[in-house]
Structures are given as structure tokens and as C-alpha cells.
Amino acid sequence: MSQIKSLLLLSCLSLFVGCGGNRVTKDNYAEVKTGMTINEVESILGTGTEQASSDASFGGISIDMKSMVWQGEDKIISITFSHDKVQSKSQIGL
């Protein structure tokens, strides 16, 4: 039984590392374009981590901003979304 648990844990860890760890790359960063939706970006980079968000409305003008990051080893991709579409992006270490 212990071997089965160990094998299952190892399989899950391999799947997690294999799916998420290699997605923070220069090529994937280049694929992300201004105007893409969050879902389109996450189909390229995987699930990101929300760092900050702001949602406000003033005199009929709506502000909806969200900052998300993707990390892998010493690499970071940061993307700012406005109304759930890419507004800007930056990277470190790619």
C-alpha cells in the first residue's frame, strides 16, 4: 500500500511540474499579445497568480484592472489586464 501511495504522489508531482514548470518561456511570452483574454493567456502559460486588482466606476467610466504573474525557476512573466484583456506585459529572466 505504501508503494502505491508513493507512486501516486510521484505521478502527481511529475504531472504538476511537467505541465506548469516549462510554460514560463521566452517563446510563450512572445505568443501573448495585447488584447488577448485571460483565458487565451492561460491556455498558453497555464494558471497565473493574481497579484492585485481594481474595479471602480467614475462618472460613467469603468476601471477594471488586474495584475497576474507566472513564475518558473528564476523566470517571471507579469501581465496587466484591463477589462479581462491584456493591456501590458513584462518579464524577468527569459
Image (spheres, grey):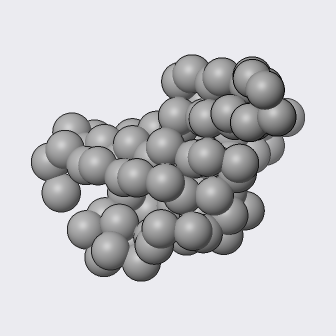
The answer to whether 18 is drawn above or below residue 90 in the figure is below
The furthest residue to the left: 93
Quadrant hosting residue 2: top right
The furthest residue to the front: 59
From the viewer's perspective, tell me whether residue 27 is left or right of residue 9. left
From the viewer's perspective, tell me whether residue 90 is left or right of residue 18. left
Residue at image position (63%, 24%) is 53
Residue at image position (45%, 47%) is 79
From the viewer's perspective, tell me whether residue 14 is left or right of residue 63. left
Residue at image position (40%, 52%) is 88
For residue 2, say whether it is visible: no
Q: Which of 69 and 62 is in front in this view?
A: 62
* Residue 23 rendering spot, x and y as whole percentages: 44, 62
Quadrant hosting residue 55: top right
Residue at image position (35%, 66%) is 29
* Residue 81 rendering spot, x and y as whole percentages: 57, 47
For residue 71, say whether it is visible: yes
From the viewer's perspective, tell me whether residue 81 is left or right of residue 24. right
Q: Which of 71 and 7 is in front in this view?
A: 71
* Residue 28 rendering spot, x and y as whole percentages: 39, 71
Quadrant hosting residue 62: top right
The answer to whether 64 is drawn above or below residue 26 in the figure is above
* Residue 93 rendering spot, x and y as whole percentages: 15, 48
